[in-house]
Amino acid sequence: MKNTKVLYISQEITPYLPESEISKIGRYLPQGIQDKGKEIRTFMPRFGCVNERRNQLHEVIRLSGMNLVIDDTDHPLIIKVASIQSARMQVYFIDNEDYFQRKFVLTDEKGDYFADNDERAIFFSKGVLETVKKLRWSPDIIHCHGWLTAFAPIMIKKAYADDPLFAKSKVVYSVYDDEFGTPLDANVRKKILMDGIAKKDVEVLKDSTFSNISKLAIAYSDGVIVGSPKINNEVMEHINSLKKPVLNYHDEDKYIDAFNEFYDMVLNNAGETKRKN
């Protein structure tokens, strides 16, 4: 029997970014799942504050060179990679001069969210999926962490639905306490449109708040994980109404085992509603 393949699309991973709830899970969850016999691939953005020399990032020429169109503009996709030797784990980085060269993550030096975070999120998710295609690696589970990954589920289920690499992939989306106050750009509904994604599919983004972006990600996921002890109330109420697998919050001592079991449940789920504590 072949090993289950798990693709991690992570907003943050330590040690490349400072420790946070998401970055610690982005670092230790893939290692734990790999130790349980599953095969993994891990991606994050190459934010400008990631120290390339200290972390020994290098460009993967055979994977770079593609242009991704966002809002009718071509943006070159650059792929870099680094290794966490102690975990026997590679991390792939999605890079682009327009979106990821600034020395901050999601906000500027004043704490204001970047006006193009919507385009950065679209570019990141699309860049991951195009790179996985080049790797010719077909994931069984795709686990998205952080709201910057929220456009990946709809891309997988609509834009890449006919691609044999993703046709059978199950999507899991983790919701965290990483809420942003200012809605994304009002034109994000138009920018996310691509072959397979129609206006009606993204109607919820007419108001591009954290809650609605989370709901979009959840709608196109096969399973949902509550990633923080407390999350946005509106999103939590929405999760409580779902008729799909949901995993409640687990602390650091238990989440790897719980997530591993949840992946297996999502893969074997025949459509029934399940909730795990």
Image (spheres, grey):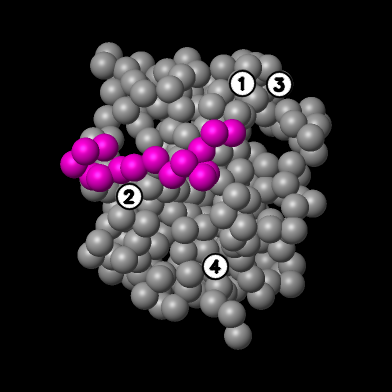
Amino acid at the residue labelled 1: Asp
Q: Which mark is residue 74?
A: 1
Amino acid at the residue labelled 3: Lys
Q: Earlier in the sequence, mark 4 or mark 1?
A: 4
Label 4: few (<14), some (14–19) or many (≥20) C-alpha neighbours in 10 Å:
many
Q: Nearer the viewer, residue 176 or 192?
A: 192
- Separation of marks 4 and 1 at Cα, in angstroms: 31 Å
Element type at mark 2? strand
Mark 2 or 3, closer to the camera: 2
Where in the figure is residue 261, as x and y percent of width and height?
Answer: 50, 75
Element type at mark 1? strand
- Which residue in the protein does label 4 denote? 5
- Which residue in the protein does label 2 denote? 82
| Residues at discs 2 and 3 in contact (Cβ within 8 Å) | no
Q: Could one spot residue 271 in this view of the protein?
A: yes
- Which residue in the protein does label 3 denote? 190
Q: Could one spot residue 224 in this view of the protein?
A: no
Instruction: Report the residue that reaches farthest toward the front.
Output: 62
